[in-house]
Amino acid sequence: MNRYMKCLNHEFSHRQGCIFTDFHVHEEVEGVQMFMGRRLPPNPSRRICRLQNRNSFFLTISESGGIMGTKNIQDAFNKIQIISMGKNLISFSPKDSSMYLAVDKNGNMFLTRKTKDVKIDQFIFEEKMDDTFYISYKLKAYRGKRAWYLSIDEHGNVSMVRCLPGTTQANSQFFLIQLKKRHSL
């Protein structure tokens, strides 16, 4: 074997002594995106949606970096791409843009590209539907009392709020309005 292969069942490469057998899967390293030790799908599905808050505000993300809520359904920036990164794991992006909605450790939101400076878990959200069919979006990086939830208050200000596990506020509950059918990249 002259190609650099990595065994998915071991931490080392075949150059370091893994025996190539038919008992486990081997894959080339290049082109594989990893998230928390798991492979991301090669062509993640994307949904073009509007996110409507329980307070009747739509989440808007402009390409210039503005993140806010609006009640105007005709606003061009309230169409958002929701990109599937795994089971119940998504990321937000403005429609037709390569930027992602990211959150730092203080709860400040910003738009960014995937770079080495930004950790991948800063723009991955957990999508959870409750029994009243509202969806909440929690930042994957933090859990428990440190968990950040996407929220729009009654004045249209978008922020990340902390909620206790198992409880969500009305400001952080969303209804998803899908505009186009799912498609791959």
Image (spheres, rainbow, N blue to C red):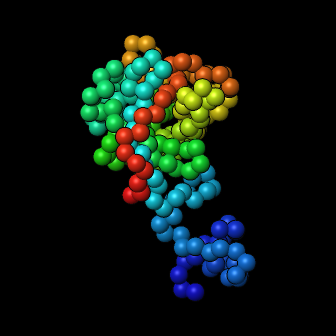
Q: Residue at x 37, y 40 (%)?
A: 179
Residue 58 visible in rendering:
yes
Residue 1 is left or right of residue 56, and the answer is right
Q: Residue at x 61, y 51 (%)?
A: 36
Q: In this view of the protein, which residue sits in the foreground, 83 or 109?
A: 83
Please say if 14 is above or below 68: below
Residue 127 quadrant: top right
Q: Residue at x 57, y 30 (%)?
A: 133
Please say if 151 is above or below 76: above
Looking at the image, the residue that sits furthest to the top is: 155
Q: In this view of the protein, which residue sits in the foreground, 89 or 116?
A: 89
Q: Residue at x 44, y 43 (%)?
A: 82
Q: In this view of the protein, which residue sits in the foreground, 116 or 138?
A: 138
Q: Position of residue 117 (x, y in %)?
A: 44, 46
Residue 62 quadrant: top left
| Quadrant in which the C terminus is drawn | bottom left
Please say if 124 is above or below 146: below
What number of labels is visible? 0
Q: In this view of the protein, which residue sits in the foreground, 48 or 114?
A: 48
Q: Position of residue 11 (x, y in %)?
A: 67, 66
Looking at the image, the residue that sits furthest to the right is: 23
Residue 77 is left or right of residue 27, and the answer is left
Q: Position of residue 167 (x, y in %)?
A: 65, 22
Residue 107 visible in rendering:
no
